[in-house]
Structures are given as structure tokens and as C-alpha cells.
């Protein structure tokens, strides 16, 4: 370093054409001092002398910085205290065990890689700074050369983001660099900072960074230091350019949120309010959704007003969430915290942020978001990526976007969407769900008479579903959104859409055993169908509402709905709808003889309608009820005729139902091996169709011929599987009956 400084002084003097004596005369620095500087024998050049020399040599600012930085390296550093700049640790701090472990792993010193960097990223108020400071205090002893901290104010409510040069100057001051030794150029200051910490083991905490550019000059260049950066933005430049580790900070778990609320309120407060406090605390936790800042605001409100019960706080929060979480102090206001991220968005990004808030359901897939925004796949993806980078939305492993409930409430009011923009976006996303669901429904039952849909509105892009597994996967992923979409359609008086969504969900609900959802969507559909001019929609709605009641064992309600469907179909003289009503009435009739009569009436009507699949349905129903009445020969004839029709028209679902019926007939007539074969064939089809409702019933029936053949272990195995499926579907009575049968060792 000394030789380099000496060479620099000689170079500058010779370039200026000055002898040592002339330079001494011009600068006032003694000749002996200049000679010492030029030979490198003077190890501690006085900075005042260096500055006088620089003036005499007419150095440019960058040349002066070079000379000063070199001189600073030559000078003996003054003794300074080890910096301990960390603010006080958060109190109370609860949970985050997994995140602390991840930080331990990410910031483990590694001589091979040098400086390690970890970014903590999440939305405002989620607890990034708390986590960073908690880890920093727990691990302070790992950094004997000190800890540096700066709040970069990247999202401050009352100031612009801090100029990194200001933060850098603060670090240099802390490290004992005298003002006259600090270079003028920012890049030279950064170089000096890196030189000073190069051989040290330090922790640098950069809180609330706005972007990568604000951080890069504050990073050590070598050694075994560690850097923790918190931000609402993802700082992808640090990941790609610096190899930083990325840690996404999410909301608290239910247990952690409860612990934080209890720690803030105090155990005595909870004991005083006893049982009422427990219920109110549970509601507060639900309304705050694991958001640390929201929980802290609520706890502070309750703490400052001991006369305010937790039930009162919960009631206020339920009625006007964001107002309760607001405060004149921006540091204690969730809306203020969120507004800082919102204000950083472009107009287009802010509009999409507002549109996501009105999308039905708890999350949204990329394809549905394309329709919601109406911007096309490429542009929509770019805007969503920006919102994700700003930590206003999250994306899971399946690529689905989700917005925290509190962020959604803020977004719904923060961006004032024009009525026509809001209405058009909702129409596009509802059409997306309706058209995609309709296509999926027709895949699940290729013989089902289709309903007529208007073309999708401009900007709507329905998804293509290639086969049954893809359709079932899509329905599974979108189920809650489809339910919310139907409710939104009904609320917006889009009654045709509400009815169409119920129709499209029918087979999926049946296969998956979603009996309560099935009932709910058809109750909505009956109300919407009443507002439509076509009587057929109302008849279908009543019939399928009756079927939904059948699945839940609501026999009086089912019969009432089905009789209504039958009466309306007779008024319209619609024999197909009459046949459907009789066919469904058979499934709910309280005695098998009456059920058989309804099935026979349905068959008689279908045989004159040229609807082979519907005729096969009725044939199988007549066979089933005949078997239950002990009329096995007639039962077999009807079921074999149904099977032939199903196979001729390639209706595999109907084929499985009839194979199941033939299994029952053979079991009841003592042909147990044939019964097992029929049941197994039916199960193979049902498993391919992912029809767990029928799988459970067929498994239950399969156990009986196994017992008759002495295969009790096989019987118990299929009954256990059936019981588990019943439980998954909420069919508790059936599950309990099988549990009792399995517990019976006789």
C-alpha cells in the first residue's frame, strides 16, 4: 500500500512537470515530507499535507479520491469501539422457529464463498424486521467485529428512500474514518468501506430496502461477513448478481398468532374475561389472519383501553376491519403500511391490484387472471409478476396467486375502479369459469344433453381440458372459486350464469361426494332459474335440487322438489323432463315397490323418446329395485338390457352402475364369485373416473360376497377402504355402520 502511494505521488508530480522543490514551494509541504512520500519511507502521511499536495498538482476529483483512499490505507487506524448498531430486539417475539432455522442455514459462514447474503421478503407489516433483528441478536456473538444496521426507509410514509451514499457515509463514520479521509465519489467511498471490512467478521443488517441499487454499495466485498436485507420487493438483482439466499416471510401460524396476542394482552387479561375472551380471541385471530402488525394493533388497542372487552374489539373489527386497523401514527397503521407499496405501483399495476380484489374465490390461476384483467397472457403475467415482487400477492408451488384477506380488503377500496371496468372484469372471469366448467362437465358425461351457452365475452380466455383426468384436476383446483363465482353471479343478477355453473358442477360434486355443496349450488340455481324465461331451466333445477336432497337423506324435501319438477314438466307437456322426474323420484321413494313404479314410468316414457342412454338408466333402475324386491329374474333381464345399451353407446359410467347392479343380483342368488367379478369390474371403471362416491358404495357391497366365500380378510380390507371414503365425504352414518361391522369379531 505504501509503495503504491509513493508511486502515485511521483506520477502526479512528474505529470505536472514540478520538481520536489517547486511542489514544496507551491504547496507549503516540506521537501523532506514529499521525499518521504515518494520513497514510501513515511508510513503515516498527514492527510492535510496530502490535500495541499493535491491542490498544488491540480488533481481531478477522481484522482484526489484515488490518492486519499491510498493514503487512508497507509495511515494507522485510530482505535474505535466495535460497532453495535442493532436496535433493541422485538418484544415479545413468538414463533418463527422454521424461519430462524432457515436463516441459520443460509447465513452459515463459508470461507469458500466469502460474504453470505440473505433477503427477507414479504408484504408490509408481516414481520420481516422483527425476524431480522431477532436473528441478529441471537447470533451477535458470531460477529466479533461488530454489527452495522441502517433503516434504508425504502417504504417510509414521510420520506423518500435513503440515498445509499448517506447510509455508506454513516457506516464509514461508525468505522472511525475521519471526515477528511472520506473520498468525494460514491464509488470510492464504497471501495473504502469494502477495504475496511474486508478481513472482518461483521453482520450488516439493511432494513427496508427499496431495490437492489440501494443495497449494492453497502455490501462487503470479501471476508466472512454476513448481510441480512429486508424488503417488500424481491430484489432479484441480489439473487442473480450476488448469489443471495431468498427467504419469503409469511403470516404467522394459528398457534404463533395466538401466542403473540396472549403475550401482548397478558395472561391476566385473558383470565379475567374467561370463556368470552377465548371466543373473542379466536375471532380476532381469524379476522387478523396471522398478520403480525394487525395483531399488534388490536392488542395495543385492547391494552390501552382495559374497559374495552375483546368481544367489543372483535365486533368493531368485524364491522369495519381497515378503519379499526388504521391509526394516526403510520407505524401503527396497517392501511398506511400497505399504501406505501400501493403508491409505488404504476397505473396499470394498481388497476390489476384492484381487479384481483374483486375476483371470486380465495385464489386465482394464471389462466383465470388473464381473463380477469383482459390483457392477454404475456402482459397479464408481467403485471402479476410485478405485484408478486412487491409482496402484494403471493404465488404457490402450483402457480396460483393468492392475496391475504386484509390486503384484499385494502385493495378493494384503495383503487377506485370505474363501474364499467369492474363489471367487465367480473363478466370476463365468470365467463372463464362457466365455459371451462361446461367443457369439463361434458367430458365427465359425454352423453349428457348439453346446455346452450352464449359465446365468451371479448377478453375472456376459457381453458382447454383434454380429457377426464384433466377435467377432474381442474374442478378440484377451482372448486372454491367456482362456488364463489356462482354466488357472485347470483349477487350481480347474472341468473343464467348462476344456473349454468350449478349444471356444470353437478357431475363433479356427485363423483367427489360433495353433497352439501351440491345442495347449496342447486338451491341458488332454483332461485336464479325462477328469474329466467325458459321453464325447462326451472324444471331441471328442481329435479337436481331434489337429487341433492336425496344424497343427503332429506327425503321429504327431495320428494317436494321432485314433485314440483314433475308438475312443471306436465304443465309444459315435456315428456323427457317428466321421465327425468320419475327416474329421480324412484331414488328417493320410501318403499321399493313405489320406487319400482316410478322407475317403470320413467322407462315407459324413455322408450318412446329415442334417448338410449336415458332408457338404459331407467332399465338399470327397474332392475335394481326388482332385485331389492326379490324379483331376480326380471332384475337380471332389465340390467343385461341396460348393459348392452351402455356398451353399444360407450357410456362407461352407466356400464359401471349396471355391473354393480348385476353384482347385487348374483350375490342375492348365491353366485358369489360372479358377484365379486362384477363388483371388481365396476370398481375398475369408477376408479378410472375418479368417482369416489360410487367407489365407496361398491366397496361396501363387495365385502358381502367376500364374506359368503369365506374371504373375511378381503372383506375387512374393502370395508376399511369404504369407511375411509365415507368419512372423507362426510357420510358419517355409513362410516359408523362399517366401523361397527369391522369391530364385530363374530
Image (cartoon, rainbow, N blue to C red):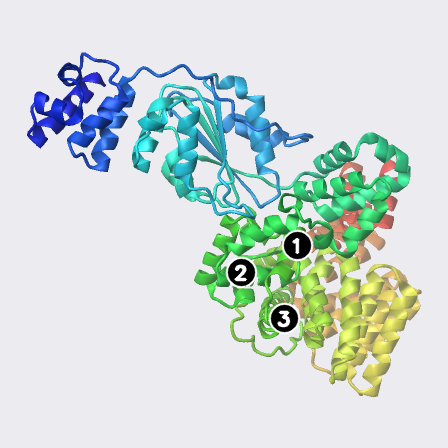
Q: Which residue is mark 1?
A: 690
Mark 3 or mark 2: whose residue is earlier in sequence: 2
Real-space CA distance between mark 2 and mark 1, rounded to the nearest whole angstrom: 41 Å
Mark 3 or mark 1: whose residue is earlier in sequence: 3
Q: Position of residue 47 (x, y in %)?
A: 27, 22
Q: Say above or below: 444 vs 667.
A: below
Q: Which residue is mark 3?
A: 649
- Please tell me the numbered disc located at residue 350: 2
**Of 28 and 83, the residue lying toward us:** 28
Looking at the image, residue 451 sits to the left or right of residue 121; the answer is: right
Looking at the image, residue 442 sits to the left or right of residue 627; the answer is: left
Quarter in which the C terminus is drawn: top right
For label 3, the crowd category at 10 Å Cα-Cα, with few meaning under 14, some 14 to 19 and many 20 or more, is few
Residue at x 70% of width, y 50% of height: 680
Looking at the image, residue 618 sits to the left or right of residue 15; the answer is: right
Q: Position of residue 203 (x, y in %)?
A: 47, 25
Looking at the image, residue 159 sits to the left or right of residue 175; the answer is: right
Residue 115, located in which quarter of the rendered image? top left
Amino acid at each position: 500500500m505504501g509503495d503504491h502511494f509513493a508511486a502515485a505521488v511521483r506520477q502526479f508530480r512528474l505529470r505536472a512537470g514540478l520538481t520536489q522543490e517547486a511542489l514544496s514551494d507551491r504547496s507549503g509541504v516540506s521537501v523532506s515530507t514529499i521525499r518521504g512520500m515518494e520513497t514510501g519511507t513515511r508510513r503515516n502521511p498527514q492527510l492535510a499535507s496530502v490535500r495541499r499536495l493535491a491542490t498544488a498538482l491540480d488533481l481531478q476529483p477522481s484522482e484526489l479520491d484515488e490518492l486519499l483512499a491510498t493514503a487512508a490505507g497507509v495511515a494507522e487506524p485510530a482505535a474505535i469501539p466495535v460497532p453495535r448498531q442493532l436496535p433493541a430486539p422485538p418484544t415479545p417475539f413468538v414463533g418463527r422457529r422454521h424461519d430462524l432455522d432457515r436463516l441459520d442455514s443460509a447465513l452459515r459462514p463459508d470461507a469458500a464463498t466469502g460474504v453470505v447474503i440473505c433477503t427477507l421478503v414479504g408484504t408490509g407489516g408481516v414481520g420481516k424486521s422483527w425476524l431480522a433483528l431477532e436473528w441478529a441478536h441471537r447470533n451477535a456473538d458470531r460477529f466479533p467485529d461488530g454489527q452495522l444496521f441502517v433503516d434504508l426507509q425504502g417504504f417510509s410514509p414521510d420520506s423518500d428512500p435513503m440515498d445509499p451514499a448517506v447510509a455508506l457515509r454513516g457506516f464509514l463514520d461508525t468505522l472511525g474514518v475521519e471526515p477528511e479521509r472520506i473520498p468525494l465519489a460514491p464509488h470510492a467511498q464504497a471501495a473504502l468501506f469494502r477495504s475496511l471490512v474486508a478481513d472482518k467478521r461483521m453482520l450488516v443488517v439493511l432494513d427496508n430496502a427499496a431495490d437492489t441499487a440501494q443495497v449494492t454499495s453497502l455490501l462487503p466485498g470479501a471476508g466472512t461477513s454476513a448481510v441480512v436485507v429486508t424488503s417488500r420487493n424481491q430484489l432479484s438483482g441480489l439473487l442473480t448478481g450476488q448469489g443471495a439466499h431468498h427467504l419469503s416471510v409469511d403470516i404467522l401460524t394459528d398457534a404463533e398468532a395466538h401466542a403473540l396476542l396472549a403475550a401482548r394482552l397478558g395472561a391476566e387479561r385473558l383470565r379475567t374475561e374467561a370463556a368470552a375472551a377465548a371466543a373473542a380471541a379466536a375471532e380476532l385471530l381469524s379476522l387478523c389472519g396471522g398478520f403480525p402488525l394487525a395483531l399488534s394493533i388490536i392488542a395495543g388497542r385492547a391494552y390501552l383501553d382495559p374497559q374495552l372487552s375483546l368481544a367489543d374489539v372483535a365486533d368493531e373489527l368485524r364491522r369495519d376491519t381497515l378503519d379499526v386497523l388504521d391509526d394516526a401514527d403510520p407505524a401503527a397503521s396497517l392501511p398506511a403500511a400497505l399504501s406505501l407499496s400501493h403508491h409505488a405501483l404504476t397505473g396499470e399495476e394498481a388497476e390489476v391490484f384492484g381487479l384481483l380484489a374483486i375476483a371470486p374465490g380465495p385464489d386465482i390461476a394464471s389462466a383465470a387472471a388473464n381473463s380477469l384483467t383482459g390483457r392477454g397472457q404475456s402482459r397479464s403475467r408481467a403485471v402479476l409478476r410485478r405485484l408478486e415482487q412487491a409482496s402484494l400477492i403471493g404465488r404457490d408451488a402450483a402457480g396460483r396467486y393468492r392475496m391475504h384477506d386484509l390486503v384484499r380488503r385494502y385493495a378493494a377500496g384503495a383503487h377506485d375502479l370505474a363501474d364499467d371496468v369492474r363489471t367487465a372484469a367480473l363478466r370476463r372471469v365468470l365467463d372463464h369459469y362457466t365455459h371451462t366448467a361446461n367443457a369439463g362437465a361434458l367430458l365427465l358425461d359425454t352423453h349428457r344433453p348439453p346446455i346452450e351457452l352464449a359465446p365468451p365475452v371479448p377478453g375472456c380466455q376459457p381453458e382447454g381440458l383434454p380429457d377426464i383426468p384433466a377435467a377432474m384436476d381442474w374442478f378440484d383446483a377451482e372448486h372454491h372459486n367456482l362456488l364463489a363465482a356462482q354466488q357472485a353471479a347470483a349477487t350481480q343478477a347474472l341468473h343464467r350464469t348462476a344456473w349454468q355453473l350449478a349444471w356444470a358442477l353437478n357431475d363433479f360434486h356427485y363423483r367427489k361426494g360433495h353433497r352439501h355443496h351440491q345442495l347449496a349450488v342447486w338451491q341458488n340455481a332454483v332461485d336464479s332459474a325462477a328469474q329466467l324465461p325458459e321453464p325447462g331451466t326451472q324444471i331441471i333445477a328442481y329435479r337436481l335440487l331434489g337429487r341433492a336432497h336425496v344424497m343427503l337423506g332429506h327425503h321429504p324435501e327431495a320428494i317436494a322438489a321432485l314433485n314440483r319438477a314433475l308438475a312443471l314438466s306436465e304443465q309444459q307437456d315435456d315428456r323427457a323432463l317428466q321421465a327425468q322426474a320419475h327416474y329421480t323420484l324412484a331414488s328417493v321413494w320410501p318403499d321399493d315397490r313405489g320406487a319400482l313404479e316410478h322407475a317403470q314410468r320413467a322407462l315407459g316414457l324413455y322408450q318412446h323418446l329415442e334417448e338410449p342412454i336415458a332408457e338404459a338408466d331407467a332399465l338399470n333402475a327397474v332392475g335394481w329395485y326388482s332385485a331389492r324386491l326379490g324379483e331376480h329374474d326380471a332384475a337380471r333381464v332389465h340390467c343385461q338390457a341396460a348393459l348392452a345399451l351402455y356398451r353399444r353407446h360407450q357410456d362407461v359410467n352407466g356400464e359401471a352402475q349396471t355391473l354393480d347392479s348385476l353384482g347385487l343380483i348374483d350375490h342375492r342368488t348365491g353366485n358369489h364369485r360372479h358377484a365379486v367379478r362384477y363388483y371388481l369390474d365396476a370398481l375398475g371403471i369408477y376408479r378410472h373416473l375418479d368417482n369416489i362416491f360410487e367407489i365407496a358404495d361398491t366397496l361396501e357391497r363387495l365385502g358381502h360376497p367376500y364374506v359368503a366365500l369365506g374371504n373375511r380378510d378381503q372383506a375387512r380390507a374393502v370395508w376399511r377402504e369404504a369407511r375411509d371414503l365415507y368419512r372423507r365425504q362426510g357420510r358419517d352414518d355409513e362410516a359408523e355402520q362399517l366401523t361397527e361391522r369391522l369391530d364385530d369379531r363374530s
